[in-house]
């Protein structure tokens, strides 16, 4: 279902905000150095087009599940999945070994490793052997089912001749429909040709597995369409067997270099708009047009008495009554997106709302609340202006609404900027600068 507009709650808008002020240095306990037994797995650069380069530079190789963090490490005996917990530290979950290389002709370049936790609804009972299930890919077109319990194991997912051969792909989300049946949202990069632009192809795979027999196979593979960029957000619901995608739909028949219009997700290309130019936002232009019309008339009135001069600032911040309550999809610009861990139960989108950042929650609709997929839950004053003014930003992270930290900007070189939550009637906000203690990145 297409989303035509995003409703904004103007009660979150701070109309008296003036500036962000520098606070005290963050506590040193925010940083902890963890020794690694191997190197963090990074794919070798095999293609230098935009999508492959974007994935290589912006991939976050930490996967969060609750309070735990997972990552892939390359060791002398091959690839391993590691887990970090506050009480135990870093320890190995399972060894994946040396991956089998895909040698089929015409196969696309390798992608990054990826991991998704299988979301399981509360009404589906699981045996004690598999307390947690994961779907992982080594980036070579292979998929494995990982069980994490007292004795973790790896079950390769086989493919039948009836299913299409998988190109190298990224595992985005996974959920269990019934015991023994898992659906996996994945995507791969379709390289640019002389006739068509590059795009990301999204698919929904259905797997069948048997933990006792230690077998798993790919049953079906269905297309979910194409996107101009990797999906901004993927949210799944095991209870409702539903998937929500926030993407930039791509026309598979569009010639290379053409402008592709909006599609099912209703979110435009975040790279299609130069956020550093001086063009006022659509909301400011609408407010300016309304104010101009207020003091403009097609008929000339006869002056009687003293003539009063009324000045109006067309580009001043609009009041809540003047601001549009909805953002139309053709004027939405995405600043950032963030999933709520690798179970993909929800996600947050940061939308540029004039100089502010509107935080929108994405959840799966259900039969009881079919219109609950998008909800404006918070606004961060002047944060869009600040974030777009930092050319070295690598990650823009959003905090959970109502918590102390509203957002964090991590730069490519050595600093992270922490922005605390601000009340809607507070004239100033507090931000802190955290030195990550890293060597300067020359990339």
Image: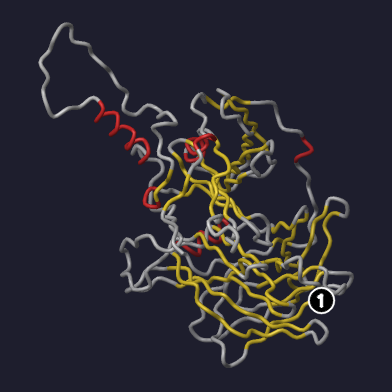
Tell me the element at label 1: strand
Camera-nearest residue between 157 and 426:
426
Camera-nearest residue between 186 and 432:
186
The image shows residue 41 at horizontal and vertical percentages of 68, 64
Please indicate whether residue 22 sits to the left or right of residue 109 in the image: right
Camera-nearest residue between 368 and 135:
368
Sort mark 1 into few (<14), some (14-19) or many (20+) by Cα contacts within 10 Å.
some
| Residue at the farthest front position | 368
Residue beneath label 1, please?
153
Rendering quarter of residue 171: bottom right
Colouring chosen for the image of the structure = secondary structure
Q: Which residue sits at x=61%, y=40%?
A: 407
| Residue at the farthest bottom position | 161
Q: Which residue sits at x=74%, y=60%?
A: 70
The image shows residue 254 at horizontal and vertical percentages of 32, 70
Rendering quarter of residue 123: bottom right
Q: How many marks on residues?
A: 1
The image shows residue 79 at horizontal and vertical percentages of 73, 71
The image shows residue 413 at horizontal and vertical percentages of 59, 43
Q: Which residue sits at x=37%, y=52%?
A: 330
Above or below for 248 versus 136:
above
Above or below for 419 versus 69:
above
Please indicate whether residue 198 sits to the left or right of residue 259 in the image: right
């Amino acid at each position: 279902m297409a989303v035509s507009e995003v409703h904004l709650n103007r009660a979150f808008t701070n109309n008296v905000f003036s500036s962000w002020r520098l606070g005290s240095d963050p506590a040193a306990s925010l940083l902890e150095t963890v020794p690694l037994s191997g190197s963090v797995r990074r794919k070798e650069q095999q293609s230098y087009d935009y999508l492959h380069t974007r994935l290589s530079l912006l991939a976050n190789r930490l996967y969060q599940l609750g309070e735990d963090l997972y990552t892939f490490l390359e060791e002398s005996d091959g690839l391993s999945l590691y887990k970090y917990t506050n009480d135990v530290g870093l320890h190995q979950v399972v060894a994946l070994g040396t991956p089998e290389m895909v040698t089929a002709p015409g196969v696309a370049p390798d992608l990054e490793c990826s991991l998704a936790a299988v979301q399981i609804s509360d009404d589906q009972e699981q045996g004690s052997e598999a307390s947690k299930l994961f779907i992982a890919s080594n980036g070579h077109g292979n998929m494995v089912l990982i069980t994490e319990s007292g004795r973790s194991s790896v079950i390769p997912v086989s493919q039948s001749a009836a299913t299409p051969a998988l190109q190298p792909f990224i595992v985005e989300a996974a959920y269990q429909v019934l015991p023994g049946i898992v659906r996996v949202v994945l995507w791969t990069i379709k390289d640019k040709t002389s006739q068509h632009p590059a795009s990301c192809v999204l698919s929904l795979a259905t797997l069948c597995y048997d933990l006792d027999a230690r077998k798993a196979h790919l049953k079906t593979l269905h297309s979910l369409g194409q996107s101009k960029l990797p999906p901004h957000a993927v949210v799944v619901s095991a209870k409702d067997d539903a998937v929500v995608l926030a993407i930039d739909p791509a026309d598979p028949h569009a010639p290379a270099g053409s402008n592709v219009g909006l599609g099912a997700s209703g979110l435009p290309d975040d790279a299609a708009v130069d956020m550093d130019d001086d063009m006022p936002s659509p909301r400011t232009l609408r407010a300016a047009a309304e104010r101009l019309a207020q003091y403009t008339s097609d008929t000339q009135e006869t002056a009687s008495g003293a003539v009063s001069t009324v000045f109006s600032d067309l580009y001043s911040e609009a009041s809540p009554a003047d601001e549009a309550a909805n953002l139309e999809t053709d004027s939405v610009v995405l600043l950032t997106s963030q999933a709520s861990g690798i179970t993909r139960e929800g996600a947050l989108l940061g939308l540029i709302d004039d100089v502010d950042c509107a935080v929108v929650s994405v959840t799966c609709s259900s039969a009881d609340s079919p219109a609950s997929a998008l909800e404006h839950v918070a606004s961060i004053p002047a944060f869009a202006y600040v974030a777009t003014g930092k050319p070295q930003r690598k990650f823009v992270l959003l905090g959970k609404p109502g918590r102390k930290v509203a957002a964090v900007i991590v730069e490519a070189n050595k600093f992270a900027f922490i922005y605390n939550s601000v009340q809607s009637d507070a004239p100033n906000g507090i931000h802190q600068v955290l030195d990550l203690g890293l060597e300067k990145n020359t990339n």
